[in-house]
């Protein structure tokens, strides 16, 4: 391949709904559910192992979250130079990002470029949703079915379905009755939406809304934002990529350890410096922009007093930016520590409230009572709109898994098993069946570990790998203990399942750090997959393909 090639692939061009030369029924080594970054990298690794894999993807193209989230202003809040695959040095060096924080179309083009560059499309079946995956104990294989009538038998089934892929519309009375247009940021129409001159409502003020609001405000006639919980947001300071910025990153890729959670952390407590020095450091991080603000001191997420200083600093910035003091006060988060809900990164978010066409409604003071045919009614009265944008988030972490009918040994259903919260070992496998980071880094680590496990099984003539119930319990306790050493559990966030009514409140992500997590996973593998039960194949013999890996 010559040149960058990144402009070729903005949209998919794989045959929809079928893999050329393959029938709907059949056998393969691995079924992969989802063609986001995880699914496409997994396919690439399995092919190198000499294994056959089929990817089923509900969308009409690859890219996962970057395929669906096309709302105005959508861009990554991890720097482009870090939001890139590291598995191919050539890919790393030949690709050029155009901005410090890439926008959604460019990240989608990157996903398409990766699919083309590694010839992945021939094993990806688009517009196909997996409906069920059932483990057959007799054959020790998974039986996977789809909404297009496919029926596939596979030794392994990997759900590469993402943490934030099940968009969620809130259960507000009368939602269906609205006569204007309704949108969700996570399912934005592909042809874009012209909101010029319209009366627009945005419900929600999470990361998606914070990116969308300034862009919608510039287009809409009027914009009314309905806020339940204010968010801390740091300016991105996004800018065009320059050779001077890109060059040192590319030169350092070989030595940069993306899993080093302490990268860029100012290794001193906020309590051990003078107030003047603290202010200087915060000002500097604010001027630099992005999520590295939380690395201004080494204890912002573990020490309440330290965290208070950072929270105060951001509140002072909000009050300085937003001209109307009453609006500024509503926008200041006060009842949870900074960083314990995912910190937001914006471009002119707070500034948008200085526009004459933008209004903020505080739902804590005047909650929504219903959606009406004409708009939104709160306890303060009815507001009329032409369009309502729901920026209300996702059924995070478990939603995409529990939406598929997954049944393991003894017919155990995943949905049932996880009724009281997810039980997994290493967050990767669950018995009876089998995030707080730069997602690309974690995706690569998860895929590498999974592929190594599959290679180990093939080399040793093993048929199944399944965590013990005890290992799951110990892992769950470990995740919780790690969470409780921080301030994370003090916020009602999607990390806790708190955004879904009735969802069990369990701290789901592992907070020990990506590097520590990788060491733990590697140690489990090095100890012969400690915590797992491995069963032999009836025709057990070492597999040469695995030995070659
Ligand atoms: P979110 O963070 O879950 O935010 C949802 C918003 O909707 C919250 O403000 C929530 O308020 C509000 N909401 C939910 N139900 C409501 C109701 N019934 N009435 C009023 N308000 C309601 O979702 P998101 O903004 O889509 O972001 C989710 C995650 O996706 C982020 O945390 C981030 O990890 C990822 N993301 C990343 C990027 C990026 O890389 N740039 C961009 C977008 C999203 P409460 O807080 O009160 O529940």
Image (tube, rainbow, N blue to C red):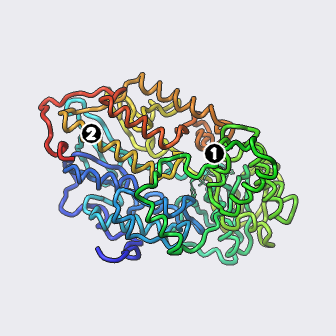
Taking depth in this image into account, of 293 and 75 the one nearest to the observer is 293
Residue at 64 percent of width and 59 percent of height: 345
Residue at 22 percent of width and 47 percent of height: 549
Q: Which residue is mark 1?
A: 267
Taking depth in this image into account, of 541 and 32 the one nearest to the observer is 541
Q: Is there CB contact under 8 Å for labels 2 and 1?
A: no
Does residue 523 sit above or below 514 in this rendering?
above
Q: Is mark 1 within 8 Å of ligand 1?
A: no
- Asked whether the viewer can see residue 173, the reply is no
Q: Give the class, few, some or many, for how many residues have Cα within 10 Å of label 1's Cα (few <14, many ≥20).
A: few
- Mark 1 residue element: loop
Taking depth in this image into account, of 530 and 183 the one nearest to the observer is 530
Q: Residue furthest right?
A: 325
Does residue 49 sit above or below 482 in this rendering?
below
Q: Which residue is mark 2?
A: 142
Q: Earlier in the sequence, mark 2 or mark 1?
A: 2
Q: Position of residue 394 (x, y in %)?
A: 55, 50
Q: Position of residue 93 (x, y in %)?
A: 39, 67
Give the quarter of the image for residue 15: bottom left
Q: Residue furthest top?
A: 470
Q: Is mark 2 within 8 Å of ligand 1?
A: no
Residue at 50 percent of width and 29 percent of height: 476
User: Which of the labelled discs sits on residue 356, or is there none?
Assistant: none
Taking depth in this image into account, of 366 and 524 the one nearest to the observer is 524
- Mark 2 residue element: strand
Q: Position of residue 511 (x, y in %)?
A: 55, 39
* For residue 90, side relative to residue 178 (left or right): left
Q: Give the class, few, some or many, for how many residues have Cα within 10 Å of label 2's Cα (few <14, many ≥20).
A: many
* For residue 222, side relative to residue 54 (left or right): right
- Asked whether the viewer can see residue 86, the reply is yes
Single out the mark in the foreground, 2 or 1. Answer: 1
What count of labels does the image hold? 2
């Amino acid at each position: 391949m010559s040149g960058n090639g990144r402009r070729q692939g903005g949209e998919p061009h794989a045959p929809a709904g079928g893999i050329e030369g393959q029938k709907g029924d059949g056998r393969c080594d691995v079924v992969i559910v989802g063609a986001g970054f995880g699914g496409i990298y997994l396919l690439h690794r399995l092919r190198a192992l000499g294994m056959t894999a089929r990817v089923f993807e509900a969308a009409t193209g690859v890219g996962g979250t970057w395929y669906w989230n096309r709302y105005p202003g959508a861009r990554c809040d991890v720097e482009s130079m870090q939001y890139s695959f590291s598995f191919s040095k050539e890919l790393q060096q030949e690709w050029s990002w155009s901005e410090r924080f890439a926008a959604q179309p460019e990240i989608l083009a990157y996903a398409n470029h990766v699919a083309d560059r590694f010839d992945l499309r021939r094993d990806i079946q688009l517009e196909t949703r997996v409906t069920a995956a059932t483990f057959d104990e007799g054959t020790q294989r998974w039986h996977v079915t789809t909404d297009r009538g496919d029926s596939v038998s596979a030794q392994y089934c990997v759900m590469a379905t993402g943490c934030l892929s099940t968009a969620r519309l809130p259960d507000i009375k009368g939602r269906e009755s609205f006569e204007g247009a309704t949108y969700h940021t996570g399912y934005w129409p592909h042809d874009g939406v012209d909101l010029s001159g319209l009366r627009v409502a945005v419900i929600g003020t999470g990361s998606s809304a914070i990116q969308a609001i300034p862009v919608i405000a510039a287009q809409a006639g009027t914009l009314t934002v309905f806020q339940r919980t204010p968010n801390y947001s740091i300016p991105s300071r996004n800018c065009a990529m320059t050779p001077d910025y890109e060059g040192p990153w590319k030169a350092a890729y070989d030595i940069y350890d993306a899993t080093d959670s302490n990268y860029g952390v100012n290794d001193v407590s906020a309590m051990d410096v003078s107030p003047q020095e603290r202010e200087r450091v915060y000002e500097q991080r604010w001027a630099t922009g992005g999520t590295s603000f939380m690395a201004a001191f080494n204890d912002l997420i573990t020490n309440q007093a330290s965290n208070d200083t950072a929270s105060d600093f951001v509140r002072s910035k909000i009050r300085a930016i937003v001209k109307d003091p009453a609006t500024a006060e509503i926008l200041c988060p006060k009842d949870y520590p900074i960083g314990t809900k995912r910190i937001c990164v914006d471009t002119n978010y707070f500034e948008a409230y200085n526009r004459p066409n933008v209004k903020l409604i505080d739902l804590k003071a005047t909650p929504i009572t219903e959606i009406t045919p004409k708009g939104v009614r709160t306890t303060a009265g009815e507001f009329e709109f032409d369009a309502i944008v729901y920026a209300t988030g996702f059924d995070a972490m478990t939603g995409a898994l529990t939406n598929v009918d997954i049944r393991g040994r003894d017919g155990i259903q995943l949905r049932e098993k996880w009724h009281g919260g997810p039980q997994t070992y290493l967050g990767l496998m669950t018995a009876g069946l089998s995030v707080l980071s730069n997602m690309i880094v974690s995706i690569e680590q998860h895929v590498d570990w999974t592929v190594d496990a599959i290679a180990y099984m093939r080399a040793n003539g093993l048929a199944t790998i399944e965590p013990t119930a005890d290992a799951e319990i110990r892992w769950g306790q470990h995740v919780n203990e790690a969470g409780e050493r921080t301030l994370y559990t003090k916020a009602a966030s999607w990390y806790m399942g708190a955004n879904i009514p009735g969802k069990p409140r369990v701290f789901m992500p592992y907070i020990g750090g990506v590097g520590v997590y990788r060491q733990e996973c590697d140690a489990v593998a090095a100890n012969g997959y400690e915590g797992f039960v491995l069963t032999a194949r009836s025709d057990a013999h070492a597999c040469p393909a695995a030995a070659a890996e």
